[in-house]
Image: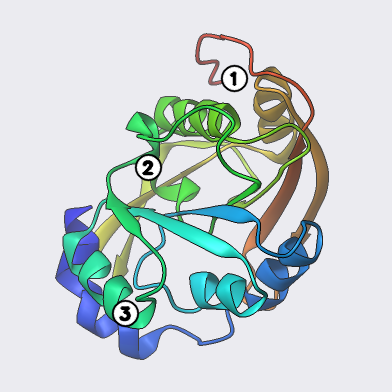
Amino acid sequence: MLEYDLIAEWYASERDSQTGVPEATALASYIPRGSLVLDVGCGNGKPITQALLSCGHRVIGLDSSSAMLTSFKQNCPEAPAVMGTTQSCPFADCMFDAAVAWGVMFHLKPEDAITAIANVSRTLKSGAPFLFTSGDVDGFDGKEGKMNGVTFRYFSFSVPGYQRILGDHGFELIDVHADSGNNTCYLAKKNRAAEVTHPKLG
């Protein structure tokens, strides 16, 4: 996304190097070594992709920011990355053993977030875990915030809302907790094939 192109250099120097690492490491422990993991919104690869790689997994990154992907290729040269969005996910069905979307879902409009969850479900194998962060209350109007002077919009569903949407797309919500940076972390597991549903915002 264009906004991250504008702050890519600042973001690389300001992001806490450990944000999300405990959760990514825990996710890595759920799956066999050498598993293929999709990092949605991989950014510059630090620290999530690097943490997954250090645990012995293979990672493919997906991001819509060309500037972030340029840094990703420098930081994680052993991991391929694709430019694109989760809403038009370019990967095959049942391809991945796990997926992570750290700091991504709350940038998506509600209907796009539902599409993203459906696409992640489509690309995951049965039993695969999916870790993502978002808000924990319904926020459909796009609250504005700034990073390094650039305006971003933030959206969210409530915890019950995410639980319902995940359930509609073959997931079981396993855990919800706040991390040390006050991100709300959702861990789900794909139990069955995704169902085709229409977006529900309530």
Residue under pointer 3: 11
Q: What amino acid is found at the position of numbered circle 3 in the picture?
A: Tyr
- Front: mark 2 or 3: 3
| Residue 52 visible (yes or no) | yes
- Front: mark 1 or 3: 3
Residue 19 on image: x %, y %: 58, 78
Q: Secondary structure at mark 3?
A: helix
Q: Residue at x 62, y 66 (%)?
A: 57
- How far apart are the alpha carbons under marks 1 and 3? 34 Å
Dividing the picture into quadrants, the one containing residue 200 is: top right
- Position of residue 61 in the picture relative to residue 176 (left or right): left
Residue under pointer 2: 142
In primary-sequence order, the first of circles 1 and 3 is 3
Q: What amino acid is found at the position of numbered circle 2 in the picture?
A: Gly
In primary-sequence order, the first of circles 1 and 2 is 2
Q: What amino acid is found at the position of numbered circle 1 in the picture?
A: Gly
Mark 1 and mark 2 residues within 8 Å of each other at the beta carbon:
no
Residue under pointer 1: 202
Closer-to-camera residue (19/62): 62
Mark 1 and mark 3 residues within 8 Å of each other at the beta carbon:
no
Q: Residue at x 53, y 21 (%)?
A: 201
Q: Mark 1 packing: few (<14 Cα in 10 Å), some, or many (20+)?
A: few
